[in-house]
Image: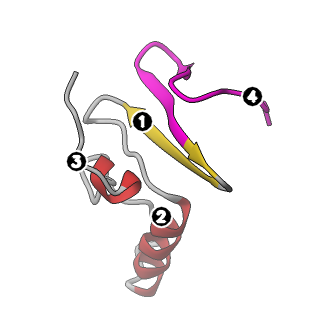
Amino acid sequence: MLVLTRRSNQSIMIGDDVEVKILGVSGEKVRVGISAPAETPVYREEVLDRIESQGSAAGTGSAPAANGDRAHPASITGSTPSHT
């Protein structure tokens, strides 16, 4: 695991097209923004675990498709997403 220290408004790039940006820090909570192509699935871990457990209960046992239930930035940060 790569461990990095970032401050508010600093980013980490994953490959050429995924940006993870620290939007803010308040106490122990960190607001993270993720910019990724639409075909790249982005899930919070607990949501992916729930989706995978529902899939295995249905007998599929596979991760959702890339165009499945992507986490919307507002559902992660609690704010309206901005498009840049």
Residue type (three-letter) at the residue carrying disc 1: Ile
| Mark 4 secondary-structure assignment | loop
Within the image, what quadrant is residue 84 found in? Answer: top left
Q: Position of residue 42 (x, y in %)?
A: 41, 46
Q: Nearer the viewer, mark 1 or mark 4?
A: 4
Give the labeled residue for mark 3. Answer: 80
Q: Position of residue 73 (x, y in %)?
A: 32, 47
**How many numbered dots are placed on residues in this image?**
4
Residue type (three-letter) at the residue carrying disc 4: Thr
In the image, farthest residue toward the top: 16
Q: CA distance from mark 3 to mark 1?
A: 13 Å
Q: CA distance from mark 1 to mark 4?
A: 17 Å
| Mark 3 secondary-structure assignment | loop
Q: Position of residue 28 (x, y in %)?
A: 68, 56
Q: CA distance from mark 3 to mark 2?
A: 22 Å
Please tell me which of labels 1 and 4 falls first in the chain.
4
Question: What is the crowding at mark 3: few (fewer than 14 residues within 10 Å), some, or many (at least 20)?
Answer: few
2 or 49: which is nearer to us? Answer: 2
Q: Residue at x 42, y 36 (%)?
A: 34
Q: Nearer the viewer, mark 3 or mark 2?
A: 3
- Please indicate whether residue 69 sits to the left or right of residue 19 in the image: left
Please tell me which of labels 4 and 3 falls first in the chain.
4
User: Is residue 48 among the parts visible in the rendering?
Assistant: yes
Give the labeled residue for mark 2. Answer: 48
